[in-house]
Image (cartoon, rainbow, N blue to C red):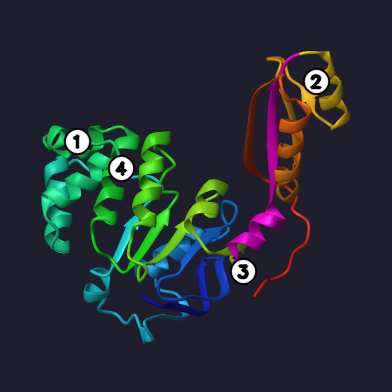
Amino acid sequence: MRVELANVGKRFGRVEALRGVTFELPAGSRTALIGPNGSGKSTLVRALLGMLRTGGEVRFDGAPAGDDRRELARRIAYVPQIAPRLAAPVRDVVRAVAGLRGVAWHTIAAVAADLGVDLDQLAARPFRALSGGQRQKVLAALALASSAELLLLDEPTASMDPRSRSAFFARVEALPSSVTILLCSHRLDEIRRLVDRVVVLTEGQVAWQGAAGAYLDDHAEAIVEVDAAGEPAAVWLREQGFVQGATGWWSRALPVAQRARLLGEITHRLDGTLRDVIARDVERLQPPGGGTAS
């Protein structure tokens, strides 16, 4: 599904939640929607779902959404950041969605099992009685099994454990290339692995859009942590700008582009004394550069 937004705006009283939002989600694209709290991300997702009337224009495969969105709704799946606390049993929630989607229970159960949830075991329990992670996994399974053409994912792994997150990544990566994804996320590992483009909202406006690689280069830094034995290793690590923490591990932050070179130096210089090394990406609080990439 191709989605086009042209000059989309939304006001709640005196608050202008969206202002002239214009961008396109090409069919089969994977796009991350990023922005601080209050930037308009949730409002924009609700507009795409047809839950809000907005100014401007939203088009799906070249056609305006219109007032009757029943057919369009069948082509869209949504995973909210916070799963609703529904009183109905899990069985009824799943069967209701499965019936609308034309998806068999066992198909959804297979995806849920991959994410770490046994639907048959939870079937009789009220949906609201599940843990936050269980509710999130059930909704993610419903979305991933739906054969939807547009997936709207709002911090979908926020309540998931690491194993379930990894399984979710693999499931998303295995989706047909025709499926379009809009992912609201602040997790750099999700951006690096799941998307090819980034759109940044600030105060209801598009502040940046472009390739995911360009965003990561400009907005992320690497944290390298080292556990090494002996004073010679400590001297070299201090010379390289590492700081030792209370547990004995050494850490240093640096631009992601310099990470590979530093890791190579660490393995070469600390050969025989290196016990472990960890590298991870974090969002830079005040990224350099700015503007809009095309």
Q: Identify whether 156 is placed above or below 40.
A: above
- Of marks 4 and 2, the one in the foreground: 2
Q: In the picture provided, is 227 more to the left or to the right than 85?
A: right
**For the residue marked with disc 3, what is the amino acid?**
Gly
Q: Earlier in the sequence, mark 4 or mark 2?
A: 4
Q: Which residues are magenta?
A: 205-229
Q: Where is residue 219 drawn, in percent x and y?
A: 69, 53
Which residue is pictured at 36% across the width and 84% down the height? 64
Based on the picture, tell me whether residue 225 belongs to the magenta stretch. Answer: yes
Residue position for label 3 = 210
Residues under labels 1 and 3: Cα distance?
39 Å
Using the image, tell me which numbered label, if any, was put on residue 118: 1
Q: Earlier in the sequence, mark 4 or mark 1?
A: 1
Looking at the rendered structure, the secondary structure element under dot 4 is: helix
Residues under labels 3 and 2: Cα distance?
41 Å
| Crowding at mark 4 (Cα within 10 Å: few <14, some 14-19, many 20+) | many
